[in-house]
Amino acid sequence: MHKRQIWIIDFGSQYTQLITRKTRELGFSSEIITVEDAKERVDSGDKPNCFVLSGGPQSIFEDQYDYSFIFQADIPTMGICYGMQLMAQFHGGKVEKGTVAEYGHSKIHLQNGFEIKGCPRDINVWMSHSDHVVEIPSGFELIIESHNKLVAGIQNTEKRLFALQFHPEVEHSEHGKDILRYFYEVIAELKEDWDEAEMLKECQEVLETAGDEYVLCAFSGGVDSLVAASIAAPMLKDKLYCFFVDNGLLRPQDYGHIETLKKNTPLNIEIIDAKEIFLNNLKNIDDPEAKRKMIGKTFIDVFEQKVHQFENDHQIHFKYLLQGTLYPDVIESVSPHKKGGKSVTIKSHHNVGGLPERMKLKLLEPLRYLFKDEGRKIGEKLGLKHEWVYRHPFPGPGIGIRVLGELKEESIQKVQQSDQILFEELKEHNLYESIAQAFTVLLPVKTVGVKGDGRAYEEVICLRMVSTTDFMTATWTELPHQFLSRVSGRITNEVPGVTRVVYDITSKPPGTIEWE
Ligand code: XMP
């Protein structure tokens, strides 16, 4: 990884990734780092151009860690929420333990004489804290106050320190990016250093390590593996093979997409037809976790077997596995916060985990420092079609987790057919790109309906459409009634065995995006 000029020290906030994303969107290179790693690197003589201290779920009164390495580094530093409290306390200010948490929308006011380019004096922001600063440290000035007269922002321009009690990185905070830009440009005086050309260069450097060896790509046709393979293709030429596993749990649009890519890109795509094996292995399994695990295990078995066969047939040996792993997966798997530990498993995500160990392949992950949006930008820069790059994400277990309960051929078909209708209508009504993810789910209930002149006792399809940028939180998407009515009408008419269509109006949390 090239040097990043901003280190975002993670104190365990659920919003740390958003700080990094927003910072990069502003054109500044940044990485997320644990306190321990930051200390180790500073102790060994490395230093960023500036620190950002994230929020965190704990109280500074329970934190005994020695943070002097941050504040004695003599570089510009921004503290957000927990980070502000650490900064204030370290410099002799007073932080008080909150009795009630302030969580949600709040209004702040910029103090007289203080200005941020592009910002009005009153701004709606997102707060999430209980402790707060009650005495400002000497040398600092109060620059922002909340409407209930709490300290919301302080700065010490001489020491280039800046701190906020609210979260400018969160979508709900108006002018969040203007506020972050103020710190980076005015206080820290940084120069922009992050754009698509820089990202692409780094990705290519990762791929250079493959030299002349054969590289195998576990290819789903989704944005991430497509971008990773498209960066690699001109470098590795005929040494790169993309294997696509047809697990029978795909939608009609996926089959169409893979055929299009086969025809219209220079990628060597091998399609492995494993529908029957998957369906057989999944017989009689109705528990969601057991299904996910079986899909994951079957994927590995099928993939490994096919690759060995291919190696024998072609007298070649694959040394590397190319994957479209993104930064959020990397950050989650290293469990950033020193006290945090890995968060509880809500669902076990399978993709190609397990393959490298079994097949002794070395990993090539050119996108491992990028967010999905950044991968998309590179994809467009490489000339990939806009509609390929902006496809909705599709989970590895596919329709397997959208047919609730046991997977049967006719249930899979109901989801395939209803999903195709939803997809066609979204495209037709120009709604596809305004939604982050849209799909149908087959519910394991039967309901009474009328079809023709008779009574029908058939199944229910649920429509799930969400708006989100980070997929960690999401809201259900508000859509025109006329559109919903059209989709419902087509599904009940055209999909055999379905009498009812419902719309899921649950946000995440508490409901996850997928149903299983
Ligand atoms: P949830 O359901 O956890 O989903 O709110 C968040 C995002 O992750 C996708 N998802 C998966 N992706 N393998 C994947 O590659 C999986 O096992 C998996 N489970 C959920 C989901 O579609 C959404 O985009």
Image (cartoon, helix red, strand yellow):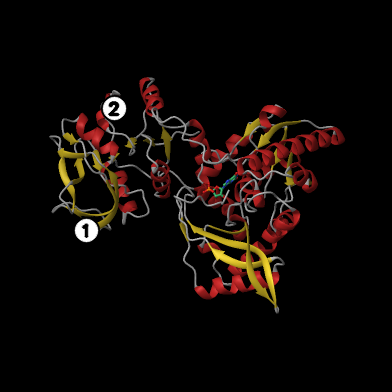
- Mark 1 / mark 2, whichever is N-terminal: 2
Nearest to viewer (mark 1 / mark 2):
2
Say what amino acid the circle numbered 2 marks: Asp
- Horizontal side, residue 502 vs residue 85: left or right: right
Q: Outermost residue toward the bottom? A: 453
Q: Residue at x 33, y 39 (%)?
A: 55
Query: Between 452 and 119, which is closer to the camera in this rendering?
Result: 452
Where residue 481 appears, as percent x and y from the top left, is 50, 73
Ligand 1 closer than 8 Å to the CB at disc 2?
no
Say what amino acid the circle numbered 1 marks: Asp
Where residue 166 appears, as percent x and y from the top left, is 28, 47
Q: Decide: marks 1, 2 in contact (CB < 8 A)? A: no
Mark 2 packing: few (<14 Cα in 10 Å), some, or many (20+)? few
Where residue 339 appears, as percent x and y from the top left, is 38, 28
Q: Dot 1 corresponds to which residue?
A: 122
Q: Residue at x 56, y 65 (%)?
A: 502
Secondary structure, mark 2, is loop
Give the answer, above or below, for where 61 lies relative to 451. Answer: above
Secondary structure, mark 1, is strand
Q: Which mark is residue 421?
A: none
Q: Outermost residue toward the right? A: 313
Give the answer, above or below, for where 276 lies relative to 385. Answer: above
Q: Residue at x 82, y 37 (%)?
A: 310
Query: Between 461 and 85, which is closer to the camera in this rendering?
Result: 461
Q: Dot 2 corresponds to which residue?
A: 63
Q: Is residue 428 visible?
A: no
